[in-house]
Amino acid sequence: MTVFRVWAPRARVSVDVVVGDRRVAMTPTGERGWYTAEVAGAAAGDDYAFSLDGADPLPDPRSPWQPGGVHGPSRLVDHTAFPWTDTRWKGMHLPSAVLYELHVGTFSPAGTFEGVIGRLDHLVELGVDAVELMPVAQFSGPRGWGYDGVDLYAPHELYGGPDGLKRLVDACHARDLGVVLDVVYNHLGPEGNHLDRFGPYFTDFYATPWGSAVNFDRAGSDEVRRFVIDNALMWLRDYHVDGLRVDAVHAIVDTSACHILEQLTGEVDALARALGRPLSVIAESDLNDPRIVRPREAGGFGCDAQWSDDFHHALHTVLTGETGGYYADFGSLADLAAALEHAYVYRGRWSAHRERTHGRAPDGLPPWRFLAYAQNHDQVGNRATGDRLSANVAAGRLKVAAALALTSPFVPLLFQGEEWGARTPFQYFTSHEDPELGRAVSQGRRSEFAAFGWRPDEVPDPQDVETFERSRLHWDDLEVERHRDLFAWYRELIALRRCTSALADGGWPVVRFDEHERWLVSERCGLAVAVNLAEGRRCVPVSDDRELRALLASAPDVTVARGAVELPPDSVAILAVTPR
């Protein structure tokens, strides 16, 4: 006997559950629009759907499996049946972690969860602590970034479905790798999105870039909030995921006394206590608002950490000289120093790009509350041609970027292929089955980049399968010497971070720089990172008169003297500084 439940307050007369060729009437429970039915003989592996007022059956809003895609029926899953082997896994320690973001469809030739498993030993060799998966909830068509998912409880079928994701998480834990999953609660994709037929999942009270906002605070929102939080808890509990990266929380509108993020982090913390292992919630936010990561008892939302784009923008503009779009707010060593010392460059400062004052100082917060990255899926894939940093700067500057991210006081995040300077782009791709939607997405993508000065004809068609194929990693890059050399540099940096307490938990740095001479020094707890971005050699002053010892350098001809280091152009050295 299986009990089916669905929230369908918009059904006017009846709700039926359709299991195979059986149609069973469901009974309203009196609980704010919920309906239930007991169906004898229904079991894991059976397909089912819900019919509202006699209409064609629709997938379950909480469908655990969509083997026929976003328009097909749902399928029952028994989460207790999977043979987990990770009982010894104690969880991920976020403050000391190095994360590695990947897209399942392009990371391996197979483009599946099994394909990722086949490359995990590479990540172990690299030395990272956890993989961060771009969204895997069922989305329209075979190809996509995952941010237009519509069946939030169902792992994408073509990636391997529910058991495929469980095998991947189990395999990661067997290799002492944690798993962070990217989840999207600020909008859902348009194709296959039937939620509004069931209930008020969306509201027109607020406008968003994707249309109607997810209903977190209007009439009927209690069940919508429950829908989102139960989804988050499912990934952590039933799939053994160690953390969630919550996409674009700045696009969530919630005026409730208890914000949805605060409710979410509270329930995640309760689940962590029940499971006996740490669980993390990482927010993506461009608000520069420290309340996102302040503890709930201090008036914050209680997220463990957040993506901080200011570090990326400050670093990227210094290395590339780009000034278009939001890069116009950055470009100096002073900005990079501010990002290293405070996480936010904009802490109540006028933003020319926004034409308003932006941000607030994150006073009293430890630096591990923020993530640092030289590249990620957004900052590569949302460029006109998806060109990586490796397509825009030479090897010396790639090594500087890696060193500044991996020696920063923040939690470092790498993007797939970054560690060897992958020659493949990462472009925006979709595979919407609705031709009109596909054309609209393609046209919208071309008009999006005017602020950066990119020509519309440079933008690849997201619907073209070749856009996806170009974005696949080429693992044979690692057979080329320059790629192997960069990979070795990343390995050395991560190994140094792991064995050096000043890098893992050394607190906020003190940064000095010379804008004209183009050098910068970041120092904390007896460790200094010295960078020369000038066209010629520079003698970089590190300390007044203390002994220095080079721990790692990106170039062979680095000269260490008392109190200073001489660096060739576009190079970096990490130095131990003798205490006074």
Image (spheres, grey):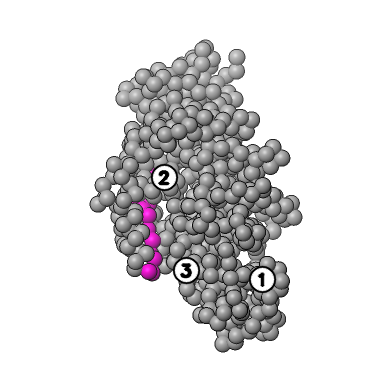
Q: Give the prevailing secondary structure in the magenta stretch.
A: loop
According to the picture, the residue beneath numbered tag 2 turns out to be 379
| Coordinates of residue 81 in the picture (x, y in percent) | 66, 71
- Which of the pair 183/7 is nearer the observer? 7
- Which of the pair 476/543 is nearer the observer? 543
Disc ID at residue 34: 1
Q: Secondary structure at mark 1?
A: strand
- Which of the pair 380/226 is nearer the observer? 226
Disc ID at residue 192: 3
Q: CA distance from mark 3 to mark 2?
A: 28 Å
| Any part of residue 374 in sight | yes
Q: Quadrant of the N terminus?
A: bottom right
Q: Is 435 located above or below residue 526 in the figure? A: below
Q: Residue 418 lies in what quarter of the image? A: top left
Which residue corresponds to the image point at 54% horizontal and 23% vertical from the top-left? 510
What residue range appears in magenta? 419-434
